[in-house]
Amino acid sequence: MWRKIELYILSLWILFFLVFVNTVPASFNAGSHFVGWKALFTIHIVPTVALVMIVLGYVIYRRFNYHVVKGAPELPKKVLKVENLNYETLSFLVTYIVPLVCFNLDPVSGSSRNGILVLLVLILMGWIYVKTNMYYQNPTLAVLGFNIYRVNTEQTENIVVIVKGKLKKDDVILARPVDDNIYFAKQYR
């Protein structure tokens, strides 16, 4: 369950980055200056939370990448059929991430309800994604070079694998289960 939540948080890494850029108090006009770290962390809470989530996303990514590179406890499996599922990550990005960036999250000029609403939407969306096992639809992983495939192997059918790089028929993979039919995988060479 925790891995699913981590992958969901990682899928929001792009959102947190965009929120940080959108809300950090910065001006590029002549004579402007940085507000200072103390003001950033005490007054401007939204970019601070976004920055913390960016750092947390980086830690989650490093753990995820370690699990993928580490390999799998199972024997190698030969891929018999491959279906690319990367298009699903784009639908996640366009449907959920982009609209959430449009909320005015500045507590000074915007409504405090916007922040509460975005938080509730993120929690509800995360709950749905974890419960329906759609957490693998991850635009962040796509940006970082991972691909999602539905594959049939000699031992299993219709499993979803998250793999760094491309996968094709007759490749051999080492898979580490995340859930019933979802696996981290790496190519076996």
Image: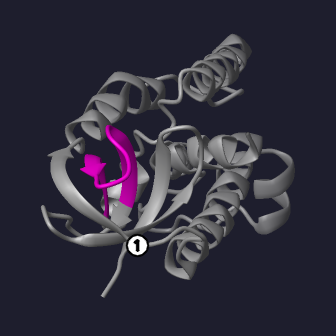
Q: Is residue 165 left or right of residue 101?
A: left
Could one spot residue 110 in this view of the protein? no
For residue 132, above or below residue 134:
above
Residue 174, position as x, y percentages in the image:
43, 71
Q: Position of residue 181 (x, y in %)?
A: 48, 39
Give the amino acid at mark 1. Pro
Residue 188 horizontal side relative to residue 9, left or right: left
Residue projecting furthest to the left: 169
Task: Give the image quarter of residue 113.
Answer: top right
Rate crowding at label 1 as few (under 14), some (14 to 19) or many (20 or more) other CA atoms within 10 Å.
some
Above or below — where is 10 with respect to 62?
above
The answer to whether residue 174 shows anywhere in this view is yes
Q: Nearer the viewer, residue 132 or 144?
A: 132
The residue at the point 26 percent across, 47 percent down is 152
Residue 76 or residue 132, whichever sits in front: 76
| Residue 151 lies in the magenta-colored region | yes
Q: In this picture, which residue range is highlighted in magenta?
A: 146-162
Image quadrant containing the C terminus:
bottom left
Does residue 46 lie above or below 27 as drawn? above
- Locate residue 131: give its quadrant: top right
Observer-nearest residue: 120 or 84? 84
Image point (68%, 49%), residue name: 3
| Residue drawn at x 28%, y 72% as measured from the top left | 172
Q: Which residue is mark 1?
A: 76
Quadrant of the image for the N terminus?
top right
Residue 163: in magenta span: no
Q: Secondary structure at mark 1?
A: loop
The kind of secondary structure the magenta stretch mainly shows is strand
